[in-house]
Amino acid sequence: MKFKDVVEDIKTLRIQGAEGVAREGIRSLLLVLQESHAVTREAVIAELYYARDQLITVRPTEPCLRNALLYVFENIYSYPDDHNFYKGLTQRIQEVILFFDNTKKKIAMLGAAKIRHGSIVYTHCHSSTVVAILVAAKKLGKKFTVHNTETRPLFQGRKTATELAAAGIPVVHYVDSAALLAMKDVHLCLLGSDAITYDAVYNKVGSGMFAELLHSRKIPLYVCSNSWKFDPHVTKRHKEVVEKRASSEIWKGAPHGVCIEDSAFEPIILPHVKAIISELGVLTPLTFLKTVKKKYNWMGKA
């Protein structure tokens, strides 16, 4: 595979999920090094920055990828020689992958502790982190059922249902418009995230609406996410950029005069979130934001 293939796979959603995009995006930098014909370190760095910019622009709502890239590029000019440059850069890439591996394991155990025998868990779309939590709870011997919604227009909810069924977890699959039925007798909700800001969590479209329903029914909503999905650059004046997708995803050949809105994500306001389950612990949104800023102060760099 070549670097351009990874970019295309991310663009066309063959690689999807915030963490999946970040993982493969970071790994693709190794492909840039392998494919490079540059004769100077400065030229290699220029190629890496060009690759970084391509990755950043291909999917707008991906702070996890941007933070991972920021970590890798942070000290790119500080290496004393070419040997240490290649060694150091490779090590930073490996550290990012290890971070994702370790945090997912920790989040899985923290999240599994929230599931009790006989629980009914609701989820929407597909989150590898949420699936990891549910599988971890199953391995602990807990018996529970999952209700999930299909997630139109690309039906990522089917991926969730397929993976849970393969793990031996009972799952009941609903169309999106039956979400109210899916929440009947539910004890808690687990959702992933694509971005976390100072006032909201952004997840697959539908999540904000479902969060309102959960809140009105006093069903606790837990957002399951590593902390690198935090976007420190979003403020009241600079909103999170929400990815818009092709109208053909929803309706190919729609009649003239029909305008189709296909936003990939929507915000869940923080008052509707019981806690964020991350590698930092099970924290209220406010405590999570304070802890992320303190632990990862490099995220605020441009």
Image: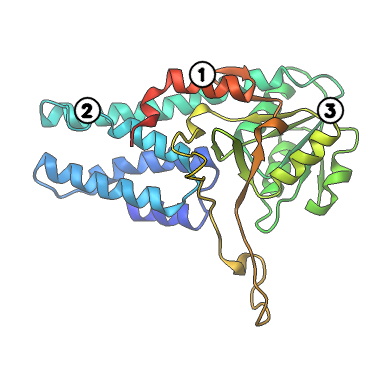
- Tell me which label, 1 or 2, sits earlier in the chain: 2
| Position of 146 relative to 207 (above/below) | above
Q: Nearer the viewer, mark 1 or mark 2?
A: 1
Query: Which quadrant of the figure contains the C terminus?
Result: top left
- Tell me which label, 2 or 3, sits earlier in the chain: 2
The Cα atoms of the two marked residues, 3 and 1, are separated by 28 Å
Foreground pick, 70 / 289: 289
Mark number, residue 131? none
- Residue 170 appears anywhere in the view: no
Kind of residue indicated by mark 2: Lys
The residue tagged with tag 2: helix, strand or loop?
Answer: helix
Kind of residue indicated by mark 1: Thr
Query: x, y (%) of residue 97?
Result: 42, 30
Query: x, y (%) of residue 290?
Result: 52, 20
The Cα atoms of the two marked residues, 2 and 3, are separated by 49 Å
Mark number, residue 187? 3
**Label 2 with label 3: CB-CB less than 8 Å:** no
Foreground pick, 71 / 7: 71
What residue sits right under mark 1 in the picture?
291
**Label 3 with label 1: CB-CB less than 8 Å:** no
Q: Nearer the viewer, mark 3 or mark 1?
A: 1
Kind of residue indicated by mark 3: His
The Cα atoms of the two marked residues, 1 and 2, are separated by 31 Å
Horizontally, residue 132 falls left or right of residue 102, namely right
What residue sits right under mark 2 in the picture?
87
What residue is shown at x 26% (from left), y 50% (from top)?
Answer: 50
Question: Which quadrant of the view contains residue 171?
Answer: top right
Q: Residue furthest front?
A: 237
Q: Nearer the viewer, mark 2 or mark 3?
A: 3
- Residue 90 appears anywhere in the view: yes
What residue is shown at x 51% (from left), y 34% (from top)?
Answer: 229
